[in-house]
Image (tube, coloured by chain):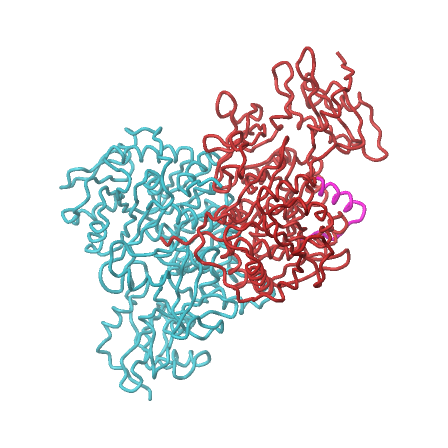
Chain colours: A red, B cyan
């Protein structure tokens, strides 16, 4: 067989050849969208590659992007890797010291940045050691005033570049194509490098009917930012399949997202639970026509059952939970149903829908504890480990590699059980498990239980030291605006579903749960803030 | 990223882990089927690997199969390659001298053969130089009497083997996994070797929603034999996706096929046009309940529009034409519709449905003549060339490689045009084109035109030497039983759709068109038989 390498360049060629008129639609303001067909998008992508090459980009050069979801970011998604260079998608929500760290650690030489985000980076500029050129992505040719010498207008560079730029055809498929950093519980973020091969295989898998079934007929709107694990790989798949892409730009209020779905007839969209909680509330108070929407994909953290039920039962839109992480490109598993579940009651289906789902083809997962692989009993907890062609084998130049990567597996630090159908159900982070009297209590299960209470907006459960039981659960609850509930009411609401020894000893009412830059509960911070809290233990 | 190899072994593990109860159903007689769940199938596959290993199979050993579509053949499909050996699927319809040639040329050491096919090979046994062991696949432990010493019962070997056999986990993804020979216009068949990587990528592509969308929810019945390009790759994909498989065994009369579709609720099936012509006639005279069937896939030779129309309009079943060849694993293109065709008239859609379709992801096609790539005008003919990760790069130990493989492309010998949507439309084989007065006439277009006439069962058009025009078309027609039509009527029926100079000069009525072992018109033989025919030229 021919040794044709798996390269992103093939995706770009395919879009240009077969789908020249299909559109990439980017929101540029609350009332405007920018629309560009693939035939012009690909030409601009070649112009960008030419412009970057003229600025010194060559094979292996790291180019940072610091941008929202829009067509220019998508141009960089292909222009950089198809030239043999590496696109480092910087998480714009990182703390300033982390932004400085990741750009310096990756040794990025060129920075592509949105005009409205430039102020965020301005103060960091003196600390960015490797950046030689900054290119500002916005309409028009003007650039912001800055102490940094080499600041260019993206549009001007493109205007001066050649659309006849030819991408190299001799790249090896294992050439690095992109990188993202993932926040660490302690210390600086850790870098993950994606290759052409890993991105091509991941993208192909997203088109399988048994995963997300992405296809030419779809209008896809990734709400998940392009700086989060390549927007879950969707922009790459979308170009390969010739899909209409809808990119929300910097504006993703529930109202504007619903407008986009309605106006552009979005068929599939993806984001974190927080987004869908907001969208659901907005849709309930101000309904839009959503009949085009065939699926909502949700990941990043656990999806409350109430959220899934509302989408599926009230709105009639399948709500698919996925699991993955920066280290896994990210799709590892999806909570799709199989044929033998067709006749199940909705309540049983909902149980599986709320899990992290069934492992996708080409990926191997395993849940292990000290006795080896756990049985498929829905109860025995172990650590989830993963391997496959789009799973990282290391952190980029980072000695923390040794902790997570062992024996050819990625050890995720997530504690899971396997249902009797083999669906993965994450019960906790290794670091967030509560060990009470030698037994594990899942903080995530308790949180999901609390969040089904009508008065609860969000809830986090953490371990508090305990003289007798070593650790006991403490519930931290944010009530919905205007709602009331007592500690005893909330604990009582859990009694039907949980063993008595799992019930939190106390409830703290907070205004807000501290969160990471990607919207996950920052339990380490919560534990720190509450370390002196005196639990009023019931027994 | 991890350098996880793409291996068929992963498919087998996936079926066993996630789809243990899904079934493989094989027809064993006109009234019986054999049913085995994947959990037992995988155990038997490991037993087979163990048994073959005990007989001396090691990495690189060639194992021949000579069998219909059934679960034992499917066991060999994985047991052999997952052990690092190579399964050579011999076309049982080859002429005896070709069977001897391909087995000797491949240097097959073990032969897996169906009990009822044993007599076909018996006489050839003295000429098979490399075969050391013959294993007879049928129920029971008895083996046929034979002059050959080492003849075993498949079931007995399995009974004695271990189901704990462990497949190697250190195979390179470019390890050869299977091989098929393709008939040549002249000379002996030519061998094509498939690798684990090529089969995995091909299988994955069959699951894309934009190709065939094979999925766990499907009940697949490949009517195309497993000795024709791996049954178009479907058995591999089916195991990976955990699909219910229905295998027609040695019995594929239209009536028995329709029974299987009805009884097993088949959702997708695939075969050559001849099969579907027969199935259509049977369904019209003796209708079955076919509501489970979501698609019929058709390839191997051109599909007449009347056939497609009958399936789509009368039966309401989408009829998807595919293109490929032994050298291409085989799927290169499929006549699926894109979204912008949704509003088209059915007649316009039918035009595209009858083409060879749109090139699938990861594959590149191009149609070239002396001026380079042809325009997308539906008219300019050129030779179709193909490249990609499941396209052969050579014929196995065959100097004819140099003819077909040049500059990194496979030159197919098929003459095609590209429609304005980029769909491939094969107009002829390079060797079957008719060159009249310096211009090309497509014999396939004329054949399709003739076959729309209600009295015509099948038609082949060949070139006859001509003193003035070099070549002129001669139509060879088989009328339907009981139907009548004159030469002039038939030629007149073409006048509306073809230029006057394309019209055949004469029509010969035959009882049968000679065909190759795979059901394609054997035009070389037709030309030979008719070389002395006196054309009654009209002008």
Judge by depth and name the residue closer to the eye, B393 or B472.
B393
Residue A310: x and y in percent read 72, 40
Q: Is residue A243 left or right of residue A142?
A: left
- The quadrant of the rendering that contains the C terminus of chain B is bottom left
Judge by depth and name the residue closer to the eye, A532 or A261.
A532
Judge by depth and name the residue closer to the eye, A460 or B504.
A460
- Is residue A129 at all visible to an observer of this figure? yes
**Stretch in magenta:** A274-292
The magenta stretch spans residue A226 = no
Whether residue B222 is situated above or below residue A366 in the rendered picture: below
Q: Main secondary structure of the magenta part?
A: helix
How many marks overall?
0
Judge by depth and name the residue closer to the eye, B111 or B525.
B111
Q: Please report the residue visible at 70 percent of the width from the left and 58 percent of the height from the top.
A: A138
Q: Is residue B442 left or right of residue B334?
A: left
Residue B532: x and y in percent read 21, 78
Furthest residue in direction right, as rendered = A482
Residue B124: x and y in percent read 17, 49
Q: Examine the image and state in which quarter residue B508 appears.
A: bottom left
Furthest residue in direction bottom, as rendered = B539
Residue B79: x and y in percent read 33, 38
- Is residue A345 at all visible to an observer of this figure? no
């Amino acid at each position: 067989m021919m040794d044709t390498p798996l390269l992103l360049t093939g995706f770009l060629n395919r879009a240009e050849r077969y789908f020249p008129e299909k559109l990439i639609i980017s929101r540029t303001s609350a009332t405007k969208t920018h629309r560009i067909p693939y035939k012009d998008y690909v030409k601009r992508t070649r112009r960008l590659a030419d412009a970057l090459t003229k600025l010194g980009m060559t094979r292996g050069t790291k180019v940072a992007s610091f941008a929202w979801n829009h067509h220019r970011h998508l141009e960089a998604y292909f222009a950089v890797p198809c030239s043999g260079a590496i696109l480092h998608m910087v998480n714009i929500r990182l703390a300033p010291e982390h932004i400085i760290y990741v750009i310096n650690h990756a040794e990025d030489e060129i920075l592509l940045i949105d005009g409205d985000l430039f102020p965020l980076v301005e103060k960091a500029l003196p600390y960015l050691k490797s950046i030689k050129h900054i290119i500002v992505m916005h309409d028009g040719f003007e650039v912001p005033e800055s102490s940094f010498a080499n600041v260019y207008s993206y549009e001007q560079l493109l205007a001066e570049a050649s659309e006849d730029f030819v991408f190299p055809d001799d790249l090896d498929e294992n050439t690095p194509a992109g990188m993202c950093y993932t926040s660490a519980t302690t210390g600086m973020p850790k870098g993950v490098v994606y290759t052409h091969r890993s991105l091509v295989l991941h993208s192909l898998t997203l088109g399988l009917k048994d995963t997300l079934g992405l296809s030419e007929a779809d209008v896809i709107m990734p709400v998940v930012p392009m700086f989060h694990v390549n927007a879950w790989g969707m922009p790459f798949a979308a170009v390969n399949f010739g899909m209409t892409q809808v990119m929300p730009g910097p504006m993703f209020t529930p109202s504007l997202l619903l407008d986009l779905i309605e106006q552009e007839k979005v068929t599939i969209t993806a984001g974190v639970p927080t987004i869908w909680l907001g969208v659901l509330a907005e849709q309930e108070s101000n309904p839009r026509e959503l009949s085009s929407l065939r699926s909502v994909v949700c990941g990043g953290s656990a999806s409350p059952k109430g959220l899934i039920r509302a989408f599926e039962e009230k709105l009639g839109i399948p709500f698919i939970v996925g699991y993955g992480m920066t280290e896994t490109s990210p799709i590892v598993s999806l909570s799709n149903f199989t044929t033998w579940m067709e006749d199940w009651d909705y309540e049983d289906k909902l149980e599986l829908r709320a899990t992290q789902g069934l492992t996708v083809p080409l990926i191997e997962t395993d849940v292990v504890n000290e006795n080896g692989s756990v049985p498929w009993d829905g109860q025995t907890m172990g650590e989830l480990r993963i391997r496959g062609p789009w799973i990282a084998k290391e952190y980029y130049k980072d000695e923390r590699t040794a902790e997570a990567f062992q024996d050819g597996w990625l050890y995720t630090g997530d504690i899971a059980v396997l249902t009797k159908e083999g669906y993965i159900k994450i019960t906790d982070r290794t670091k967030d498990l509560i060990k009470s009297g030698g037994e594990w209590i899942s903080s995530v299960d308790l949180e999901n239980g609390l969040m089904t209470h009508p008065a609860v907006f969000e809830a986090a459960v953490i371990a508090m030291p305990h003289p007798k039981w070593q650790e006991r659960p403490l519930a931290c609850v944010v009530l919905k605006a205007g709602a009331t509930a007592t500690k005893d009411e909330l604990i009582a609401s859990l009694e039907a579903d949980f063993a008595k020894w799992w019930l939190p000893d106390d409830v703290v009412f907070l205004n807000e749960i501290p969160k990471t830059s990607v919207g996950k509960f920052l339990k380490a911070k919560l534990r720190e803030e509450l370390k002196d809290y005196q639990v009023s233990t019931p027994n």
